[in-house]
Each structure stands twice: as C-alpha cells, then as structure tokens.
C-alpha cells in the first residue's frame, strides 16, 4: 500500500500535470477538506462504486456521483469522505488540458462532476474494469496513461489564453487583467468568454486562485507566519483581504488552515 505520483511522458505532459495512485488504509478522520486547484481532475474509485462530496456546512449534505468522474476546476474547497478514499487513481490536468479529452466547454466542468461513462461510454467502463483487475500500482498508472494517450485530441489553447496563463502563473501576486486584455487586442467580453471556455473560470477568478495557491505553497511548511508580510508579498491589499480570500477558497481563515494542516497540503483533516 502506498501513494504513487508520476509525470506523464510527452506529448501527454502538455495536457496532464500528473497521474496518481492511492492505495492506503482508511484514515482516522471521516472528512477531509480539499483545496481548489486551477486544473480539472479525473478520479476513478477502485474501492466503491460511487464518489461522494459533502456540503460545507453542519448538515454535511451528500452529493453522489459515478465511480469514475471528471470534474473541476473547483472554485472553492470541497468536503470528501475518507472512507471511500482507500483505493483511488486519478489525473490532474493542466489548466485547459481536460478539453483535449472531453471536448466539453471547460466552464461546463466547473464545480461539478460528470460521469466518465457519460462522455466515453463503454470505453470508460472497460478502463475501470481493467484497473480493478491490475494489482500493481505502477501497472495501473501505465494502463491509465495509455488510455489517456489514445484519446488525446491535443487542441491548441488560443494564443491569447496561453499568454494570459503564462503571465498570471509567473506573477500571480502582480497580475493585472486589464493590461493582459489590452495586449490581446480582443474586447474584454470576447477575451473573458474565450478564457472561461478553455480554462473553466474567468481570468480574474483564475488570478485570485493562483495568488491563493502561491500563498498556500509559501506557508504550508512554516512553523510561524507573519500574515501581514505574507499579505503584502502575496499582492493583497492588507491582511483582511488575505483572510477574505482564504475564506472564499479554503472555507476557513489562514490561522485555521495552519492548525488543520496534515501530511498533504491540499487535504485538510476535519473529523
């Protein structure tokens, strides 16, 4: 039992950030909060015949989906059930990468899960069956990579979107959308519509998420944090602005995030 992560070989690496296989004993806690990331994800549950996501409130209302789903990018954190996260395999796409496999408008994937069989039919069912019959995690990752490669369409991102992604990714704390739009020569409406279709969210929201992710990466392993300094370095107006963004994306304050940290930066044990 272990957690394995691999970066796919070219040309798949242009669309996929990483593939992972999780085969671990049940966690001691029931729920986990999963932080949002800018790319879509594909998840195949090899332990149960469904996936479950819970509402972020005291009632913990459950939403059920198929065992194999593709979804995201998520615009806020999600609550998952660790009881089903015992044997799972998945894919993390680069921003815009999932469109190469689904042909879907990326905005249609935001904050929802779509059954993989609804898109790929029997091929998706056969993939899960083959993964269930493959005991070796390394072999499972090879099976998944080959399946993805066979369905890769490799559409090119619009140059205007690619330029914006590169610029925001390099300097999220300094990102200014107005100048980026002017650089493209497109109207704000046309650029926003194109960006949402290919990335799944508007450029301003994407810049906010990337700025939040940069802060999470910076403080995750810290023993003590100067939040006022982090706010300034992260491009926030003040510490209150930083707290507001943590509540929006993580569902908690920065202090609560630091207290809830577990062994994986994107997964926070709840109870």
Image (cartoon, rainbow, N blue to C red):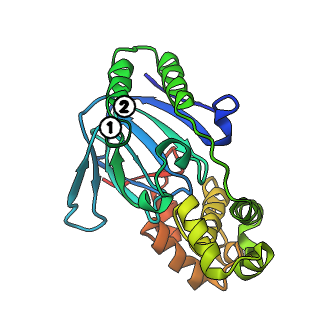
Percent x, y of residue 192: 60, 74
Q: Is residue 52 left or right of residue 231?
A: left
Asked if residue 223 shows in the view, the reply is no
Quadrant of residue 214 within the rendered picture: bottom right
Q: Is residue 227 left or right of residue 255?
A: right
Percent x, y of residue 144: 49, 26
In percent of the image, x 76 and y 72: which residue is there? 184
Quadrant of residue 152 within the rendered picture: top right
Q: Which residue is denoted by mark 2 in the rendering?
A: 124
- Name the foreground residue: 142 vs 155: 155
Percent x, y of residue 102: 47, 45
Q: Mark 2 falls on what kind of element?
A: helix
Residue at the right extreme of this rendering? 183
Q: Is residue 248 left or right of residue 182?
A: left
Circle 1 crowding by C-alpha within 10 Å: few under 14, some 14–19, many from 20 = some
Circle 2 crowding by C-alpha within 10 Å: few under 14, some 14–19, many from 20 = some
Asked if residue 67 shows in the view, the reply is yes
Q: Quadrant of the N terminus?
A: top left
Q: Which residue is denoted by mark 1 in the rendering?
A: 117
- Asked whether the residues under the numbered discs 1 and 2 touch, taking CB atoms below 8 Å apart as contact, a structural biologist would say yes
- Name the foreground residue: 212 vs 140: 140
Q: CA distance from mark 1 to mark 2?
A: 5 Å
Does 23 appear above or below 30?
above
Q: Mark 1 falls on what kind of element?
A: helix
Task: State the count of labels.
Answer: 2
């Amino acid at each position: 039992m272990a957690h394995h992560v691999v970066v796919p070989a070219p040309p798949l690496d242009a669309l996929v950030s990483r593939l992972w296989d999780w085969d671990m004993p049940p966690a001691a806690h029931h729920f986990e909060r999963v932080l949002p990331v800018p790319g879509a994800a594909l998840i195949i549950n090899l332990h149960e015949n469904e996936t479950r996501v819970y509402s972020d409130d005291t009632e913990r209302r459950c939403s059920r989906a198929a065992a194999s789903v593709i979804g995201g990018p998520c615009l806020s954190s999600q609550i998952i059930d660790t009881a089903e996260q015992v044997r799972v395999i998945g894919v993390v796409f680069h921003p815009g990468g999932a469109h190469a496999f689904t042909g879907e408008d990326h905005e249609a994937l935001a904050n929802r899960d779509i059954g993989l069989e609804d898109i790929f039919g029997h091929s998706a069912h056969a993939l899960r069956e083959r993964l269930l019959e493959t005991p070796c995690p390394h072999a499972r990752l090879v099976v998944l990579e080959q399946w993805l490669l066979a369905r890769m369409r490799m559409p090119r991102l619009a140059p205007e979107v690619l330029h914006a992604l590169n610029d925001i990714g390099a300097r999220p704390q300094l990102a200014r959308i107005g100048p980026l739009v002017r650089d493209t020569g497109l109207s704000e409406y046309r650029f926003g519509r194109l960006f949402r279709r290919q990335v799944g969210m508007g450029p301003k929201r994407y810049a906010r998420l990337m700025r939040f992710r940069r802060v999470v990466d910076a403080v995750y392993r810290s023993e003590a944090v100067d939040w006022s300094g982090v706010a300034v370095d992260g491009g926030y107006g003040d510490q209150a602005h930083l707290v507001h963004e943590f509540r929006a994306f993580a569902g908690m304050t920065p202090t609560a995030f630091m207290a809830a940290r577990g062994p994986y930066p994107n997964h926070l044990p709840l109870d």
